[in-house]
């Protein structure tokens, strides 16, 4: 298994040197608690925790997987003990409000810790992650009474949370869901229906699980306009907050998956289970987007974290593996050189490095916006929310796609050894594959970006962001080492804007659908280019190998990866008829 080490130095570079987190934290209400010393201590202690507790369980958890028996799920050996240590060390409540028992630190600090957690053992890291989203959802939409009942034990980690959307017959088309919610005389509801693909829907880590469930009230309108949101605990809760008898919630089975085998993916059955309405009736999907958007940013972190882990494994192997002679020779006294000297191995490693470190920048840029959204002034919060509306589908969709490329290259660097289980590289590729699917596939992210976030608002969200990017790039034109990159980025932004205008003229839904994923990927490459130019602008002023490596990686990104936007522009402009011309019956002539 690759010997993962948390990239504390690079996190400090991103947060302190590129994105100005020290000043950012000082400007937030209550942000003085996130002092430089506190941030440094959390990053260092977080690194020790994941390296000592989570990393050793990554391979064994994959090999053992979860076990289902008569509705009960047992997680892999060691998972419960590791979770207990997570709780005991206070990691669960890092960024949650002090009034509920949390430490009240900025959300972005939790994002930095979560990258380490997800890199070290994604299957295990999924369990607490979902709880964080459930806390935000209950906090945003529930009554004070329900908040006081359900939030504190989730903040402490004693209870966990899930998101229950998908049903077998509707998948991502939530307008078709059938789960019912019938009112009871005491103001609660009886929830009846079945949900699939519920991560951590049942497990042995916590004494209670709080399900956030979409369901329909009687006589609710059809489609998404008739969906409401409910809190449904696995075990009912007494008035004093203690756990009572079991609710009518059961796990019908768990899925046997390609990856993340240590994370239980469940079929959950609700048979008249007691639930509590949160948010307005028939407005549940809008309320659930509190959870969905939180989760999408978390999934972007998962994608980047796998790229980092795979890069570390590939780099270590490339430094040690002796094969063929380099030009010039590195070890002329030996029969062959380490493969890291060969240009194509460098190409693969630099691709991994560019996507991992660039993805970290983009994720922490978004995390900074989340801080402002939660704790900034009304005007600042509104601006941050608008920027996140644009960047969330880009981060989620783009980073999870290029993470698959990064983990593929990790296998390729190792050659045949990469294909063998004991080296651990293939597990990273299997584990990360789901990230481009759950919380909305890449196509759904592309449609959300193009239709809802860009075109629906006449491109205003995009214009505000591209203005920021262009202004920054122009500021770098006078720096000799950065001029080439700055010119390239300005040109790509102009291409982005031009393509957006062209797509705005398309009226047919198929035309937009056929271009959405390519448009998202183009948006991602340009957004990551902005991040790399920001990093290069800092590195060019500093001395040392760390900074020269940043400049070299930025040049590689601009010369070898950003040019992919040229071919994407061609496919974006292509007519949907290319995809629709062939009759569905003519796809195959086997019979």
Image (tube, rainbow, N blue to C red):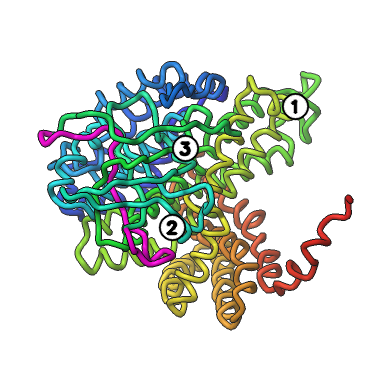
Residue on which the image places disc 2: 392
Is residue 92 left or right of 344 when viewed as pictured? left
Q: Quadrant of residue 410?
A: top right
In the image as oriented, which residue stretches furthest toward the left?
240
Residue on which the image places disc 1: 416
Q: Residue at x 56, y 35 (%)?
A: 431
Q: Earlier in the sequence, mark 2 or mark 1?
A: 2
Q: CA distance from mark 2 to mark 3?
A: 28 Å
Is residue 331 left or right of 200 when viewed as pictured? right
Residue 395 screen position, x and y as percent: 48, 54
Residue on which the image places disc 3: 267
Mark 2 or 1, which is nearer the eye? 2
Rendered position, 383 above or below 155: below
**Badge 1: few (under 14), some or many (20 or more) residues near its Cα, within 10 Å?**
few
**In this rendering, does residue 127 appear at all?**
yes
Q: Earlier in the sequence, mark 1 or mark 3?
A: 3
| Residues shaded magenta | 218-240
**Badge 3: few (under 14), some or many (20 or more) residues near its Cα, within 10 Å?**
many
Residue 351's disc is none
């Amino acid at each position: 298994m690759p010997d993962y080490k948390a990239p504390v130095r690079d996190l400090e570079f991103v947060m302190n040197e590129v994105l100005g987190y020290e000043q950012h934290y000082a400007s937030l209400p209550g942000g003085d608690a996130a002092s430089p010393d506190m941030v440094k201590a959390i990053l260092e202690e977080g690194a020790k925790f994941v390296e000592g507790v989570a990393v050793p369980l990554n391979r064994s958890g994959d090999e053992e997987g979860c076990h289902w028996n008569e509705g009960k799920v047992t997680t892999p050996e060691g998972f419960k003990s590791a979770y207990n240590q997570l709780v005991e060390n206070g990691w669960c409540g890092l960024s949650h409000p002090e009034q509920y028992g949390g430490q009240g630190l900025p959300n972005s600090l939790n994002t930095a810790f979560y990258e380490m957690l997800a890199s070290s053992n994604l299957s295990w890291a999924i369990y607490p992650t979902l709880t964080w989203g459930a806390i935000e959802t209950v906090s945003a939409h529930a009554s004070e009474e329900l908040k006081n009942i359900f939030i504190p034990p989730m903040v402490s980690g004693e209870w966990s949370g899930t998101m229950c959307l998908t049903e077998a017959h509707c998948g991502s088309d939530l307008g078709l869901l059938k789960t019912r919610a019938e009112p009871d005389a005491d103001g609660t509801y009886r929830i009846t229906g079945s949900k699939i693909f519920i991560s951590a829907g049942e497990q042995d880590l916590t004494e209670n699980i709080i399900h956030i469930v979409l369901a329909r009230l009687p006589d609710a309108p059809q489609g998404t306009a008739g969906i409401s949101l409910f809190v449904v605990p696995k075990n009912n809760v007494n008035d004093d907050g203690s756990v009572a008898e079991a609710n009518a919630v059961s796990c019908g089975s768990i899925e046997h998956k390609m990856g993340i085998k240590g994370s239980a993916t469940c079929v959950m059955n609700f048979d008249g289970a007691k639930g509590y309405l949160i948010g307005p009736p028939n407005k549940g999907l809008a309320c659930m987007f509190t959870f969905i958007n939180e989760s999408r940013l978390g999934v972007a972190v998962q994608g980047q974290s796998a790229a980092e882990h795979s890069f570390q494994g590939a780099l270590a192997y490339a430094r040690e593996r002796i094969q063929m002679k380099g030009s010039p020779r590195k070890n002329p006294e030996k029969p062959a050189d380490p493969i890291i000297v060969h240009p194509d191995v460098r190409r693969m490693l630099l691709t991994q490095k560019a996507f991992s470190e660039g993805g970290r920048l983009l994720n922490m840029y978004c995390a900074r916006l989340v801080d402002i959204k939660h704790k900034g002034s009304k005007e600042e919060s509104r601006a941050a929310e608008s920027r996140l509306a644009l960047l969330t589908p880009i981060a989620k969709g783009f980073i999870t796609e290029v993470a698959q490329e990064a983990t593929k290259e990790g296998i390729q660097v190792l050659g045949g050894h990469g294909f063998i289980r004991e080296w651990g590289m293939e597990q990273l590729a299997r584990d990360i594959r789901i990230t481009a699917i759950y919380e909305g596939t890449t196509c759904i992210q592309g449609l959300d970006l193009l239709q809802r976030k860009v075109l629906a608002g006449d491109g205003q969200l995009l214009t505000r962001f591209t203005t920021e990017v262009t202004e920054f790039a122009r500021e770098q034109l006078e720096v000799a080492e950065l001029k080439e990159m700055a010119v390239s980025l300005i040109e790509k932004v102009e291409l982005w804007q031009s393509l957006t205008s062209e797509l705005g003229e398309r009226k047919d839904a198929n035309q937009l659908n056929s271009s959405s994923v390519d448009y998202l990927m183009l948006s991602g490459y340009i957004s990551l280019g902005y991040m790399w130019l920001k990093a290069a602008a800092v590195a060019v002023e500093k001395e040392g190998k760390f900074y020269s490596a940043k400049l070299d990686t930025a040049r590689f990104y601009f010369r070898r990866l950003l040019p992919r936007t040229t071919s994407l522009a061609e496919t974006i402009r292509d007519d949907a008829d290319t995809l629709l011309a062939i009759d569905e019956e003519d796809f195959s002539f086997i019979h």
